[in-house]
């Protein structure tokens, strides 16, 4: 807080207003993504198995909050000096979206090329699911193989009795 106060005194008003408005856009955009994700996942999965939903009034409250955030973002240019922050935020969202989609497209082409060559490609997610991936673990959290074999032998002896 003190750093923000210091910047307010040291920097020209336009620069400070740009920083605040672009940060405000980032926070509002994050909430829009969170609300949209919540709506989608809650629609697909419903309430938790315990039956106690943490957000009462679904879907009305989700839609109300989502529309409110979008209206606040849309009204940013109406406040003097906040249009630049909105534009900067939108440009950043577009750049990140292009990079994400470009990388995703590139990875799909690599997978198709490998499959076309006859090479079997296993995605990292499937490797983890199959437990074929190896992870480095500390000795304290690993299972001692000697102890494990000794316990197996003890169980076998107990089963014979």
Image (tube, rainbow, N blue to C red):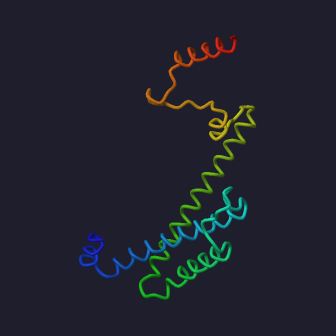
Residue 158 appears at what percent x and percent y?
65, 14
Name the foreground residue: 105 vs 30.
30
Up the image or down, 108 lies above or below 10; here it is above
Left or right: 67 in relation to 80: right
Left or right: 69 in relation to 121: left
Up the image or down, 104 lies above or below 145; here it is below
Q: Quadrant of residue 102?
A: bottom right
Q: Quadrant of residue 56?
A: bottom right
Up the image or down, 124 lies above or below 94; here it is above
Left or right: 14 in relation to 147: left
Q: Residue at x 57, y 71 (%)?
A: 32
Name the foreground residue: 112 vs 160.
160
Which residue occupies the extreme front position in the image? 161
Residue 18 appears at what percent x and percent y?
39, 77
Q: Quadrant of residue 62?
A: bottom right
Quadrant of the rendering where the C terminus is positioned: top right
Residue 124 appears at what percent x and percent y?
62, 39
Name the foreground residue: 131 vs 50.
50
Q: Residue at x 29, y 80 (%)?
A: 12
Quadrant of the rendering where the N terminus is positioned: bottom left
Q: Residue at x 67, y 33 (%)?
A: 130
Residue 87 appears at what percent x and percent y?
50, 76
């Amino acid at each position: 807080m003190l750093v923000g106060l210091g910047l307010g005194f040291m920097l020209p008003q336009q620069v400070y207003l740009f920083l605040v408005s672009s940060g405000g856009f980032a926070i509002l955009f994050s909430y829009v993504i969170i609300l949209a994700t919540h709506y989608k996942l809650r629609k697909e999965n419903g309430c938790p198995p315990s039956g106690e939903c943490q957000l009462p009034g679904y879907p009305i409250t989700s839609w109300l909050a989502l529309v409110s955030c979008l209206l606040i973002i849309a009204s940013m240019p109406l406040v003097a000096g906040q249009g630049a922050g909105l534009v900067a935020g939108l440009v950043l969202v577009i750049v990140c979206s292009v990079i994400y989609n470009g990388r995703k497209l590139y990875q799909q082409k690599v997978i198709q090329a490998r499959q076309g060559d006859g090479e079997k490609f296993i995605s990292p997610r499937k490797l983890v699911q199959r437990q074929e991936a190896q992870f480095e673990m500390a000795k304290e959290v690993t299972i001692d193989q000697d102890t494990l074999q000794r316990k197996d032998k003890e169980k076998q002896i107990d089963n014979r009795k």
